[in-house]
Amino acid sequence: MSDRTFRCRVVTPAESLLDEPIEYANVPMWDGLMGFQHGRAPLVGKLGLGELTLRFPASTHGGGDRTFFVDGGFVQMSEGELIILAENAQSAETIAESDAQKELDAAEAMQVDPEAADKAAEADRVRLSRERARVRLRIAKHSRVKGI
């Protein structure tokens, strides 16, 4: 690895999605976006819902950026390595725009069950389903425009 790169691993409970050197990571934390570069101080944080963008050096994949959908989990930066332990993660190139649109349509049709014991929790579940679907659709559309 060059002096500008650091190792990045993206892992879910089901699989390891990535283990490669990168130059920069833009990570959706629970309270906003956070950037990571070589030499960053150690950190452990809570991962949020959103678009993870990784920038690769020219020697890897011809350089450029790669995008992932991530939802929940933890991030750890230490000793020149960024580990993203995501509850749910998917690379942009595997998200079909038509499937994401169907997911959004289904989420938009969801209603809070008037018989639910905890209406606030039910409303949060519906809101999160819609937000996840919107993020996945935005990532799918963006990757199509970029030609991924």
Image: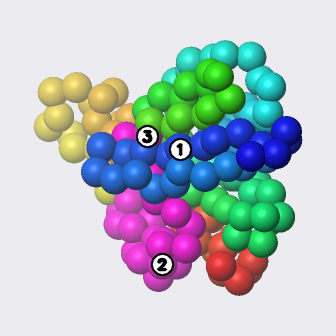
Residue 28 counted in the magenta span:
no
* Circle 3 residues within 10 Å: few <14, some 14–19, many ≥20: many
Element assignment for label 2: loop
Q: Is residue 107 magenta?
A: yes
Residue 117, image x, y percentages: 15, 27
Q: Give the residue at mark 1.
A: 9
Res. 30 in view = no
Q: In the rendered structure, which amino acid carries the disc numbered 1?
A: Arg
Q: Which residue is mark 3?
A: 86
Query: In this view of the protein, which residue sits in the foreground, 58 or 115?
Result: 58
Q: Tell me the chief SS of the magenta region.
A: helix
Nearest to the eye among marks 2 and 1: give it. 1
Which label's residue is closer to the chain start, 2 or 1?
1
Tell me which segment is drawn in magenta. Answer: 86-109
In terms of secondary structure, where does tag 3 sit? strand
Sequence-first tag of 1 and 3: 1
Give the amino acid at mark 2.
Ala
x, y percentage for residue 116?
17, 34
Does 23 sit left or right of 139 as displayed?
A: right
The residue located at (65%, 22%) in the rendering is 79
> What x and y, as percent, mark residue 89?
45, 52
Vertical placement of residue 16 versus 78, above or below:
below
Q: Which residue is mark 2?
A: 96
User: How far is the residue under mark 1 from the one under mark 3?
Assistant: 10 Å
Using the rendered image of the protein, determine whether residue 44 is visible from the camera's viewpoint.
yes
Gap in Å between the C-alphas at discs 2 and 1? 24 Å
Q: Quadrant of residue 57?
A: bottom right
Query: How crowded is the residue under tag 2: few (<14 C-alpha within 10 Å), some, or many (20+)?
Result: some
Name the image quarter holding the C terminus.
bottom right
